[in-house]
Image (tube, rainbow, N blue to C red):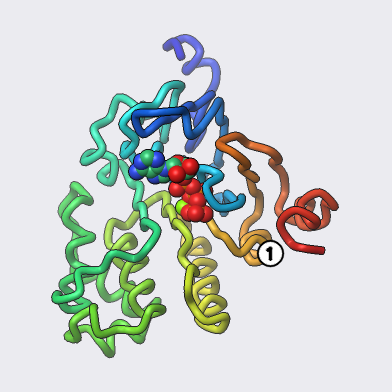
Amino acid sequence: MTTTQQAADPAPFLSLSSISASYGGAWVLRDVSISMKQGEFLAVIGANTAGKSTLLKAISGLMPKVTGAISFMGHDLIATESHRIPALGIAHVPEGRHVFPDMTVEENLITGAFTRGRETSIAGTLTRIYDLFPRLKERRSQPAGTLSGGEQQMVAVGRGMMLEPKLLILDEPSLGLAPMVVEEMHERFHEIHASGVSVLLVEQNVSLALESAERAYVMASGEIEFEGAARDLANDDRIRRAYLGI
Ligand SMILES: Nc1ncnc2c1ncn2[C@@H]1O[C@H](COP(=O)(O)OP(=O)(O)OP(=O)(O)O)[C@@H](O)[C@H]1O
Ligand SMILES: [Mg+2]
């Protein structure tokens, strides 16, 4: 995009324009375009291997090969080294939690603050995270590996929130969790969203994703198949047949 175009067209919060991405072999994402407004709660849904995690990795600079353009608040993410992306305000909670099992809950959370790139009070952020997840406060001195799956997912989300992000990216945060825990997690995501953080959620539970998000993209085989208001997609017969089994 040229400077003149940027001046005429105010930079969107997050935009992916004609992204293709590969791990070294075939293209896994093909010509994917997505845009997100600041303050939005956006979901990306789709079947296994559709390319959802790959899309999130492309945003976070973790894909070996990407073509197209990705911009976040005026920054060119493709030109930004991956280790500098968190400091721009993007927290990526990857699929599979990945807590450090031998470190305590609090030590795990504090690792999330290392990449935030500015000096603010870690204690203040920790307090906010413990308000959000009181269970983590109770277990702050316990090794994270001894927690339940749901509690480990809270640690993973809390670690992302330690960045005080503008954009929170969540990859399948409810995978393998009991339905009640999943509901509780989604309530927390709504609180996070209500506090002013934009949320980009990848979720295998399509009905839950469409309940939580305001808008969604549906991916199939590395491409965007549908896009729209979550409510409209939830009522769309094609989505209902393919993803909701109705
Ligand atoms: N590290 C990798 N190296 C090579 N190919 C990969 C790698 N990770 C994923 N792929 C391939 O990329 C495609 C998309 O995978 P991706 O993980 O993005 O799908 P997904 O939509 O997140 O699926 P799931 O719902 O199972 O998490 C798949 O065909 C997968 O095999
Ligand atoms: Mg995935």
Q: Secondary structure at mark 1?
A: helix
**Which residue is label 1 attached to?**
207
Q: Is residue 11 left or right of residue 156?
A: right
Q: Which residue lies at the image location 47% right of the left edge and 9% below the top edge? A: 4
* Rendered location of residue 114, percent (x, y): 16, 55
- The kind of residue tagged 1 is Ser
The local crowd at label 1, few if under 14, some if 14 to 19, many if 20 or more residues have their Cα within 10 Å, is: some
Q: Which residue lies at the image location 60% right of the left edge and 34% below the top edge? A: 223
> Where 221 falls versus 109 (above or below)?
above
Q: Quadrant of the C terminus?
A: bottom right
* Rendered location of residue 7, percent (x, y): 48, 16
* Rendered location of residue 49, percent (x, y): 52, 47
Along the viewing direction, whichever of 223 and 3 lies nearer the viewer: 223
Q: Is residue 7 left or right of residue 159?
A: right
> Where 68 falls versus 179 (above or below)?
above
> Where 144 falls versus 221 (above or below)?
below
Q: Quadrant of ligand 1?
A: top left
Asked whether residue 208 appears in the rendered view, the answer is yes
